[in-house]
Image: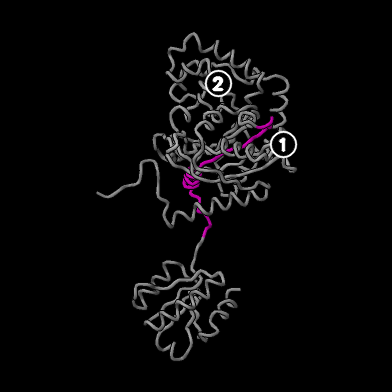
Amino acid sequence: MSIQIPRGTQDILPGEVEKWQFVEDTAKEICRTYQYKEIRTPIFEHTELFQKGVGDTTDIVQKEMYTFEDRGGRSLTLRPEGTASVVRSFTQHKMFGQPNQPVKLFYNGPMFRYERPQAGRFRQFVQFGVEALGSEDPAIDAEVISLAMTLYKKLGLKSLKLVINSLGDKESRISHRTALINHFQPRIEEFCSDCQNRLEKNPLRILDCKKDRDHELMKSAPSILDYLNNESKTYFDKVLLYLKELGIEYEVDPTLVRGLDYYNHTAFEIMSSAEGFGAITTLCGGGRYNGLVQEMGGPETPGIGFALSIERLLAALEAENIQLPYENPVDCFIVALGEEAKLKAAVLLQQLRQHSFSADMDYLDRKMKAQFKAADRVHAKYVAILGEDELQKRIINLKNMETGEQKEVAITDFVNQFIQLSK
């Protein structure tokens, strides 16, 4: 019996992986222009990190984490998201003491959640995200949102919608929490067991329930916007003002709460309205988490960030029929006929590659016609022909595959000639 790939995972094969590389390279380049630096954290962490950082009332912690004990009896978890790990690293390495503040970071790597696999959702998925730690200026909220929107637009997406809300500060959330409990408590038995458990622990999470989202009490639930104190309302208004000045369209949605416990103040999602994208329209989500660094044992430090799935980004590009402008043609394909020619071709390939040219040759001892077909399949710009006649004359025939022009070049001067042709 052949061994198959685990459910909820995928192989990204040549021909497809180039799309990933293009998207990830674009994201990194945009981060460079915004002055966000890359950070890399372990794929597994102590389970307590996610229980504290993500929140033990979330679906992620309660149902979706891949958790195991190592040989020392320690509970470890494959990371289900990136923010908790970044904040842990920020705290552990005392990055809050660096002279340049805020500390602006980005990450890109695999995450793991035990979810029901469906289109665009996997148990191992790649998440790209940014975190800005050390500033509670509304301008940095707008910058983080701008970075995400810039990435999507740079890649050509047009069917985008930014949805934003404020979860308020601690005082505002306490007032809203009381209102939510009073609203749901009389009929809480009509809700799922998760919602019943969350009523006292974190009633805001009830609004994020997927099972009961169509219940009539959901539609009439108290809005957080009605409970914002003056400070929270002023903060939110400033964020919206910055977005307006940056030319970023948005829609305020008072029901948006996000799925993680650490958010406060700004919360946002970017969605795709492209036809055929699927029922799950969210591309990206993020928000502000001013108490998370303290939760990790660090000093009081504000923070904001977002995360997006590369898989869902690629699905959105496909839904809008956007062809990424990536190319990986071979600069030179050497058609070698005979053992002596193959030996010389191997040397020439090495020399071309040392000058950063993409170069290849045939390794199946095929006839010349088949080798030319192979060169066509890899979109070779030039084909160099080396056979017995060429070896005797100490030349190599170099053909421009676009123009059809062909010329003889001395073997000893081949690499230098190729460098000149490519300038």
Residue position for label 1: 139
5 to 299, vertically: above or below? below
Residue projecting furthest to the bottom:
393
Q: Residue at x 43, y 35 (%)?
A: 69
Looking at the image, which is closer to me, 18 or 132?
A: 132
Could you tell me residue 269's position as x and y percent?
57, 34
**Residue 291 falls in image quadrant:** top right
Determine crowd level at label 1: few under 14, some 14-19, many 20+ residues with C-alpha closer than 10 A.
some
Could you tell me residue 260's position as x and y percent?
54, 29
Magenta span of residues: 298-326
Q: Which mark is residue 178?
A: none
**Residue 177 falls in image quadrant:** top right
Residue 375 lies left or right of residue 137; in this view the side is left
| Label 1 to label 2: alpha-carbon separation | 26 Å
108 in magenta: no
Q: Residue at x 43, y 91 (%)?
A: 392
Can residue 247 be seen at all in this image of the molecule?
Answer: no
Could you tell me residue 381's position as x and y percent?
50, 71
Residue projecting furthest to the right:
99
Mark 1 belongs to which amino acid?
Ala
Residue 413 lies left or right of residue 72; in this view the side is right
Residue 168 lies left or right of residue 42; in this view the side is right
- Can you say which quadrant of the picture contains the C terminus? bottom right
Mark 2 belongs to which amino acid?
Leu
Q: Which mark is residue 204?
A: 2
304 in magenta: yes
Residue projecting furthest to the top:
186
Circle nearer the N terminus (1, 2) = 1
Q: Residue at x 47, y 70 (%)?
A: 380
180 to 96, vertically: above or below? above
